[in-house]
Image (spheres, rainbow, N blue to C red):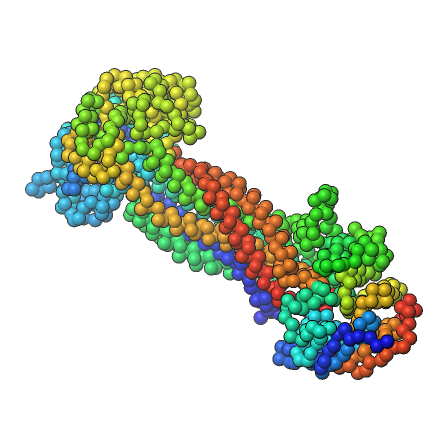
Amino acid sequence: MKKNVLMKLDRITRTYQMGEVSVHALKETSLDILEGELLVILGPSGSGKSTLLNIIGGMDSPSSGEIFFGQENLSRAGDQQLTRYRREEVGFVFQFYNLIPDLTAGENVELAAGLVENPLSVAEILKEVGLEERVDHFPSQLSGGEQQRVAIARAAVKRPRLLLCDEPTGALDQKIGQTVLCLLSRINREQGSTVVIVTHNTPISAMAHRVVRMSSGTIAEIIENKNPLPAERIEW
Amino acid sequence: MNVLTRKLRRTIGSTRGQFLAVAAVVTVGITVYIAMSTAYYNLNRSQAAFYAENDFADYYFHVVRAPQQITRQVEAVPGVEKVTGRIQKDVPILKEDHQRATARLISYPLPVDSEINRFRLETGRLFEKYPQGGGIEVLVDPKYFDANLHSFNDEISIVAEGKQVFLTVTGTATSPETIITMKDAGTMMPDPATFGIIMMPHNQAEQILGLDGEINQVVITCAPGADEKVVANQVKEILEPYGNLASYPRKDQLSHAILQGEIDSLKAIAGFMPAIFLSIAAAIQFVMLGRMVKAQRLQIGVMKAMGYTSGQIMFHYTSYALAVALAGALLGILLGLGLASVMSRTYAQFFNLPETISGVNYRAVSYGLLLSVAVSLGAGLLAVRGVVKVRPAESMRPEPPGGIGRMFLEGWPWIWQRLDATWKISLRTINRKRGRFGITLLGVVFAVGLLVLSLFMNDAVDYMIKKHFFEEQRYDLLVRFNQPVKEQELYNISRLEGVVKTEPLFEIPVKIYLNGRSEDDLLLGLPPDTTLKKLVGIDEKHLALPEDGILVSARTAKRLGLETGDWVEVETLLGLGPARWTTLTVAGVNRQLVGGGSYISLDLANRVMQESGVVSGAMLKVDPGKTGSVEQELSDMTGVSSISSQRKELDNLNNSMDSMIYSVTMMIVFAALLGFAIVYNASVISFAERRRELATLRVVGFTNPEVSSLLFKENLLQSLLGVALGLPFGRFMTEWFVQGVSTDLYTLPIVIYPQTYLFSALGGVMFIMAAHFLAARGISRLELVEVLKNSD
């Protein structure tokens, strides 16, 4: 069955002005993100993968080109429209977790849940990520893996149609990284969220439905993966 | 330029908002310090120089009349350095416009060169003992001259011993005892239109006042080291047979007391205002530098790895504070010197101080500089002591997330669970950063307190005017006679057209004794059913005038430690006939905001004087349109010595309020600046520290206003608490301030109107909002991608 297109990027360019130098982070890049897929964007640092993710996530706007989320044109969206888009449609997971230090694990999740009409139950999702015992702990009392699981719970609780992860295992060791990847793939499977993972870690691409390989600010190739590997079997 | 200096310069550039805010607080502190202490210094020096140059008396003795030679006896008292016998008497002036004024005649034995209380000729020429072509030559004080006369050789007409006498004015002069020309402590402000000093040769005064070969005042200076009180008691004994009316030390001399009060309050302000501003500046710098060292941990680690010592690095960060101090102090010195010269000039003009010393007070300048640098250095070193602990290797690793912010409120789940996540963030942040919160709070409390104090000045004056002129003194005119008259004679006044009501008054200068101590006071006899004068107690409640017993003045009560029910001895000091002694029971203590005295019933006043049916003056209620004509007719009555008009006194007072408005406005601006600076800095720091957290919230989907409101909630708590504490603190500061500037003659009522609290609270909220929004501008410019990319 052919999947619907959730997001369409059409000849996106992103140029940064760094002092007197123009940096072309993205050059004429086009990509369709499909509903319900798990997409891995792979590339070395400086290849433009984070820029692409930021534009997909509405944290940044393209210098030229068009982006559509469903019928909604985000290419020239203002700050308000982008905020609403992030709030309702997108969940973010960062390399360094970015939890609010002054909120407990439970409260960090609650914080996001309060932003949407129909969130998942906070208790449920924390149970789901295996942290039901750690609800009242502050980030400083949690290990890196635990913090990342809270971050995933925080992103997922909104039932986002798009879950974006920027090097989610970048600061974790392999074993803990694996559990994080398992979680992401389960959310993709069970909740039907489209999951986009940005990484420079090639083995991770084995779990993807499709792999986008970036190089020098543009898409080098898109590989369809007929038989994605279960996350728990990924090793690096 | 050294690399670290260059780094410092750039840091200042990138934090210029904060830099300027703290520097401004330092500037205000130093400006006020330099201006006030220079004005104090100048005023103090010119006062001292002027007193020394003219041999200002140490003690005054008034007698009814005594032979001139008595001064020899006084001179022989051990401890007495110099003695001058002279004549001083208040007489009515008949002005050309038929208005009444009072002249204080002071006689000067010629030549005056070696006498006490000499004067300095300001304009014109000295009077002559026996002018060619006859007549009497006099000098007047410059204020009276400016207000009433046109040119030298103008004549002043006075009434002396019942006869009209013409005096020719040859010039103007000021002496240490006439720097401020006020008739008595009952007047609120000098009014040169109704009171002036006339200086004349002693021989002429003897003649017109019928005191041939006699004097009625002895003034002395004491030898250095002599016990003034002992000397005074011995002189009093010598003067006893001549009707010792009053004696007082220099500190009770009106002109001196007022000038000294002003100088003292300058000194008080010069001390406490800068102390507040410099401490707050130090507190802000402490917070700023502490934060800077934390934020630049990595840089510090790198510098250490390269071989910089902790000392060098600490000095580098402390230099920031020194730069703030220097910038603030230099600007403050410039502004302060400017303001000082304006102030010194204004004071010199107001006080008519001939010796205007207007120098740069180098000591104040160097103290100011030293003080601000020392304070900044201290705050800086204390704040950056953390540098020592930074280890190069550790500093390169990202810092773990902040500590556990659990707080006491969480013990009460029914409150805690009702709070949304953003409130929890705010509360826990405050809890975790208690020190900084406390410092900011302190700043807000001081700023709001200063606002209360500034606005209080208006309240106090307004209250005094309302109470004094509209509630307590209900008469329009107060008439005094040359000598006591029978009460029936008041009929001549009450029948004048326009006089609505006349009530008698009997004023008797007295000495009140209790347990061997005494105090000069004025007894005021009024009819017990008086409607033109309302008496109030210390508690502001109405006091009924008893038939018997005395409502003693608050000042005398305080000085003698009197309480209701005490028995006091009263000795009359009226220059007519022998002194009378009476014993009176204290029926209460009255307070009057301006002037005042001790009140008794009219009958009792007569008994004290062993008279009956006699009065010395009258209070009049007059038809509003007729005040002028009534005053005119009263002026033409020969028995009338002075007429004081409430309306004129009020006008005179209102005219002199302008300068107060300036200083109040300035104080308000300073207070707002103080509050703004500290809240702005705290907000900027809090914002900088939490860029990452705020950006995360933005990414998660919080809107700009939602993120801004998070910071706002912290500021709101700060401002609510700051205002709530600042208002009572303001009252406390006011009490402290009033205590500092009060003299025996003047004290401000501690009255703070509700609107002062309201305006101070609003003002506080306003500067907090302004600072918050200026600091929170950055939220909309948060580069989400930039902020989140780095792990720190």
Residue closest to the far front: A1
Residue closest to the far right: A233
Q: Is residue B100 visible?
A: no
In the displayed structure image, the side of residue B301 where residue B641 appears, left or right: left
In the displayed structure image, the side of residue B369 where residue B237 appears, left or right: left
Q: Is residue A209 above or below residue B495?
A: below
The quarter of the picture where residue B782 lies is bottom right
Residue closest to the far left: B133
Q: Residue at x 34, y 32 (%)?
A: B472
Expressed as whole percent of the image width and height from the top left, the position of residue B59 reads 32, 32
Image quarter hosting the N terminus of chain A: bottom right
Expressed as whole percent of the image width and height from the top left, the position of residue B80 reads 31, 31
Q: Nearer the viewer, residue B583 or B167?
A: B583
In the displayed structure image, the side of residue B64 where residue B33 appears, left or right: right
Q: Nearer the viewer, residue B768 or B360?
A: B768
Image quarter hosting the C terminus of chain A: bottom right
Q: Residue at x 18, y 44 (%)?
A: B126
Q: Nearer the viewer, residue B93 or B684?
A: B684
The quarter of the picture where residue B508 lies is top left
In the displayed structure image, the side of residue B691 where residue B655 appears, left or right: left
The quarter of the picture where residue A164 lies is bottom right
Expressed as whole percent of the image width and height from the top left, the position of residue B487 reads 21, 22
Q: Residue at x 36, y 51 (%)?
A: B344
Q: Is residue B310 above or below residue B635?
A: below
Expressed as whole percent of the image width and height from the top left, the position of residue B84 reads 25, 33
